[in-house]
């Protein structure tokens, strides 16, 4: 299954709990709007840190949302592409990974050594219950294509697993690169290489 | 590729499906510039599709105002409201009641179309924010498939009908008002007599006079349950209040009828609606709520108007049919009622039990309130909450006007287990209904009218109060705080012990966010009295003001003296003097933090305030009705394109009848829906009188309608379908022209 979902999310989690609190991210995201620090038409920042395991602090853009996300007990940068996804899943993933990576790196630069992402793993969410119901059959059906596509992105063998057992939840896949410690530069290089080969 | 429309076609009630299709067609017409932007705005609002802050394409980023170049460019979904700008979807939940399945669908929609958050409003609705308008038809279809409508969630119509969350389980209620709220919801939805208001119309039910829950005295129409002995029988009915409201100028509702029986309830409501539509202000939206009409006429004259109107309200079997169905309205608990059994209690249970549990009138059952911070919960929490509901209470879920989730019919023996499960999903906080449990509107986060950050302030106060809640005396713990981002009162600050509403003041060359302090409002007695505005303080000083007020109250209050009484006795002058030290405005250089709002690091500005859509668009009834004809005609075109000529013919015919009806209703509101009646009235009022006549074509276009009304041809082919759609277009244009000529104005 290689249908492009309505919305596509990529989350990179932090390697460890930072000293920075979620409220410290709010002024960072506000400044990003002023400085146009990440791509897209940036609109506003919204604060959901009062909601347990919620989207945390969200930078809303026209095309995508950038959340300093607190879901699943893992703090991370959750990039959700809402519009203008290319019609091909490979390209949609490449585009979303590239944007997610750029935002994660920008956040790392705000607190060097404190905010550190694990780029050897990601959660990929398919916000589209029409085409991607969260059930084992859909996962098994999508797994071969996703394995190929994500192996291309990470440049190594990836292991995929369904994130949520709950059929009502969004269809999400965790992707881990086996035995490798992928850093941001390596991932960026891979994405650039893939872009040129497309 | 499959669409939601196709997938859910068997699950969506036909009438709801048609309304959504019509709206979708109107969207397309607007994008093509064929539907007036004001008319579309009102049609959109009546689907609950609201604008949001920055949808005019501008935002101040703390340094300068920037243009937001939305991709669809100049296409608008209403005056000064850009098509691609994120908006808010309001979803009506009548009396706040919903099922586990409905909660699941709402949660799905939150993370597919919104930002993963469901927000409970102060009128028991759900709001999803940052929704793209293009997603709204499918969003509505998915809701319709589980029996939820967004119809008339905004706009100048009857909004969500609210009721006490304890209705049916309360110790003090006269009777359960839920089935009446339900019946009135169904009766008024899309009713002809609620389509021509100058402003919105809010209805609330309450089961008793003493408690807060129903808040009937602050509503346009409030129904308070009563019984009377008549001929030796106990008869149910309602004291009917009219003309209450908060907003900038709060009004206490007046008693329209001391006692209206069940039989009188719906016709009386209909008569009130007709009087409001007929006599209410239409041009000046600031004076268009029914409270101004009641104040202008006086309650006695208003009552006389209603009584006269009652005499001409057409007979409607639904006026009384619902009474027979009242007994069908029942609750199915998931488990048999059972007392707490002495098993070990989880940590924190006792605090939670003290504040969040209400022992129902039914032995062995309790109602629990989930302290839902700022009215927000995640889609994931929604799914898990649906599980908890199924496990313990079945479909007995409600949303409260205090922006909490309420689960009813919990077997007492299950309280420790449900508490444990709620803690697992982050919804086990104690202190529901206490000073921590603050009500707030969206404010500057998303509202176009927001002046100050009500949510930012609420989050800050909440955090500070939680830290010391266990140290607070009961008299303070029990206080109600309510916050609005502006004077429009969506946070209901007038009926709080301590209310705040956003405004701003100037200091040097900068604006500083402020909150006006409103003290001594009464939540009980159905919003029995409104608070006093005592002065505006910088937003940053509000926590200090709260502390000063509560400390002094504790120190000076007499034995058992409540906050309202204390405020009244202290007097406005003394309170103002107490606030004076907090009102001092530092310069920007002295205290730059004062020039940023809570939860917002930008230097404060009021440049982002836009034109709100709360008031809807003042659009004539004719404009709204003719727009339906135009969208139906558009659907006929789509059917023609699909090669479905029979459907194209049916839609074209329907569009002609809708256009005729639009014109007829400018003279005869009660024409109804019957095609024969509509065509007959149209003929006698506009054709026979030649009022519809075109200067050159005379009655030719009207005859298109008459011809089709006589019957469809035996065989409908492409040529015929094409022809009737063209004729429909000409007829609609004819109606437009005639209406302008006859009535002089289309859009008010």
Image (cartoon, coloured by chain):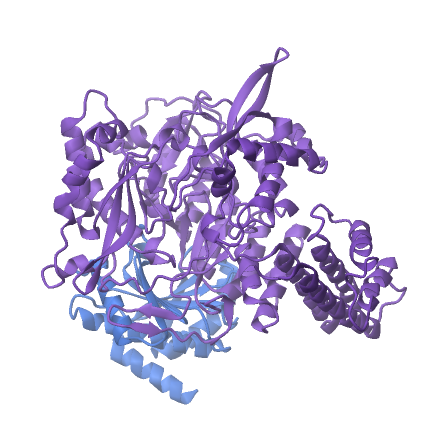
Chain colours: A blue, B purple
Query: Which quadrant is the C terminus of chain B positioned in?
Result: bottom right
Classify residue A161 by image quadrant: bottom left
Classify residue A111 by image quadrant: bottom left
Residue B553 in view = yes
Q: Is residue B118 above or below residue B608?
A: above
Residue in view at x 35 percent, y 77 percent: A98
Rendering coords of residue B514 (x, y %): 24, 52
Q: How many marks?
A: 0
Rendering coords of residue B374 (x, y %): 33, 47
Q: Is residue B593 above or below residue A142?
A: above
Describe residue B315's horizontal placement relative to residue B512 as left or right. Answer: right
Rendering coords of residue B94 (x, y %): 52, 41
Q: Nearer the viewer, residue A121 or B211?
A: B211
Describe residue A79's horizontal placement relative to residue B225 as left or right. Answer: left
Q: Residue furthest right?
A: B714
Describe residue A198's horizontal placement relative to residue B685 as left or right. Answer: left
Residue B138 in view = no
Q: Is residue B287 above or below residue B548?
A: below
């Amino acid at each position: 299954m290689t249908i492009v979902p309505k919305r596509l999310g990529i989350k990179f989690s932090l390697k460890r709990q930072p000293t920075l609190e979620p409220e410290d991210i709010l002024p960072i995201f506000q400044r990003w709007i002023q400085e146009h620090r990440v791509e897209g038409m940036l609109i506003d920042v919204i604060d959901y840190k009062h909601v347990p395991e919620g989207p945390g602090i969200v930078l809303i853009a026209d095309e995508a949302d950038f959340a300093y996300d607190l879901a699943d007990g893992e703090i991370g940068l959750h990039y959700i592409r809402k519009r203008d996804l290319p019609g091909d899943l490979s390209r949609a993933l490449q585009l979303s990974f590239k944007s997610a990576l750029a935002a994660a790196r920008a956040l790392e630069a705000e607190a060097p050594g404190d905010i550190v992402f694990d780029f050897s793993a990601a959660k990929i969410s398919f916000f589209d219950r029409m085409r991607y119901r969260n059930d084992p059959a859909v996962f098994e059906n999508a797994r071969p294509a996703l394995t190929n596509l994500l192996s291309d992105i990470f440049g190594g063998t990836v292991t995929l697993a369904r994130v949520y057992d709950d059929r009502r939840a969004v269809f999400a896949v965790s992707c881990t690169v086996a035995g490798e410690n992928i850093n941001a530069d390596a991932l960026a290089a891979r994405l650039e290489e893939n872009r040129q080969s497309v | 590729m499959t669409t939601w429309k196709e997938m859910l076609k068997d699950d969506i009630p036909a009438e709801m499906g048609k309304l959504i299709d019509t709206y979708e067609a109107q969207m397309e017409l607007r994008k093509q510039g064929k539907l007036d932007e004001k008319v579309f705005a009102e049609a959109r609002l009546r689907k609950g599709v609201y604008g949001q802050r920055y949808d005019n394409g501008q935002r101040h980023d703390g340094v300068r105002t920037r243009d937001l170049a939305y991709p669809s460019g100049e296409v608008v979904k209403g005056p000064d409201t850009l098509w691609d700008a994120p908006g808010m979807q309001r979803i009506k939940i009548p009396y706040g009641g919903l099922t586990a399945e409905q909660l699941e669908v709402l949660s799905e929609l939150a993370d597919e179309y919104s930002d993963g958050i469901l927000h409970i409003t102060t009128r028991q609705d759900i709001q999803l924010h940052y929704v793209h308008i293009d997603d709204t038809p499918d969003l509505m279809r998915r809701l319709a498939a589980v029996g939820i409508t967004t119809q008339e969630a905004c706009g100048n119509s009857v909004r969500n009908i609210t009721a006490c969350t304890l209705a049916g389980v309360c110790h003090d209620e006269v009777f359960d008002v839920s089935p009446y709220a339900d019946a009135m919801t169904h009766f008024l939805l899309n009713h002809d007599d609620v389509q021509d208001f100058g402003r919105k119309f809010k209805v609330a039910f309450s089961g008793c006079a003493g408690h807060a829950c129903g808040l009937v005295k602050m509503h346009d129409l409030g129904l308070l349950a009563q019984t009377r002995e008549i001929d030796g029988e106990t008869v149910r009915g309602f004291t009917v209040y009219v003309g209450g409201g908060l907003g900038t100028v709060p009004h206490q509702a007046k008693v329209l009828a001391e006692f209206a029986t069940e039989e009188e309830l719906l016709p009386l409501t209909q008569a009130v609606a007709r009087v409001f539509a007929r006599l209410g202000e239409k041009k000046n939206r600031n004076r268009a709520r029914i409270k101004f009409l009641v104040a202008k006429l006086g309650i006695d004259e208003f009552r006389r108007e209603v009584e006269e109107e009652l005499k001409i309200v057409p007979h409607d079997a639904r006026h009384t049919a619902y009474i027979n169905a009242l007994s069908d309205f029942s609750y199915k608990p998931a488990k048999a009622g059972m007392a707490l059994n002495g098993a070990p209690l989880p940590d924190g249970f006792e605090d939670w039990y003290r504040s969040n549990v209400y022992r129902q009138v039914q032995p062995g059952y309790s109602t629990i309130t989930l302290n839902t911070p700022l009215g927000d919960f995640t889609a994931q929490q929604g799914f898990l909450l649906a599980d908890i509901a199924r496990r313990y209470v079945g479909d007995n879920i409600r949303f409260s006007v205090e922006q909490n989730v309420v689960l009813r019919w919990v077997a007492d023996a299950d309280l420790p287990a449900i508490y444990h499960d709620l803690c697992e999903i982050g919804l086990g906080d104690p202190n529901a209904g206490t000073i921590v449990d603050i009500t707030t509107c969206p404010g500057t986060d998303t509202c176009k009218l927001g002046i100050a950050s009500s949510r930012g302030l609420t989050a800050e106060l909440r955090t500070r109060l939680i830290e010391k809640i266990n140290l607070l005396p009961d008299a303070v713990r029990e206080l109600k705080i309510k916050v609005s981002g502006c004077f429009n009162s969506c946070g209901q600050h007038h009926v709080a012990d301590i209310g705040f509403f956003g405004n701003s003041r100037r200091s040097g060359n900068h604006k500083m966010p402020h909150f006006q302090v409103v003290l001594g409002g009464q939540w009980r007695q159905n919003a029995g009295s409104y608070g006093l505005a005592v002065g505006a303080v910088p937003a940053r000083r509000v926590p200090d003001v709260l502390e000063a007020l509560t400390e002094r109250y504790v120190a000076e209050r007499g034995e058992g003296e409540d906050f309202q009484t204390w405020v009244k006795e202290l007097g406005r002058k003394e309170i103002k003097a107490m606030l004076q030290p907090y009102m001092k405005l530092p310069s920007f250089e002295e205290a730059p933090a004062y020039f940023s709002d809570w939860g917002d690091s930008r230097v404060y500005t009021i440049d982002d305030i836009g034109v709100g859509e709360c008031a809807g668009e003042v659009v004539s009834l004719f404009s709204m009705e003719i727009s339906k004809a135009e969208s139906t005609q558009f659907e006929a075109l789509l059917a023609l394109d699909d090669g479905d000529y029979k459907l194209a013919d049916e839609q074209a015919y329907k569009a002609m009848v809708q256009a005729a009806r639009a014109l007829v209703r400018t003279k005869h509101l009660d024409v109804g829906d019957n095609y024969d009646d509509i065509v007959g009235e149209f003929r006698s009022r506009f054709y026979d009188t030649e009022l519809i006549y075109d200067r050159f074509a005379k009655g030719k276009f009207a005859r298109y309608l008459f011809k089709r009304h006589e019957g469809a041809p035996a065989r409908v082919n492409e040529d015929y379908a094409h022809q009737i759609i063209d004729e429909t277009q000409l007829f609609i244009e004819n109606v437009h022209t005639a209406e302008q000529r006859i009535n002089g104005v289309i859009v008010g």
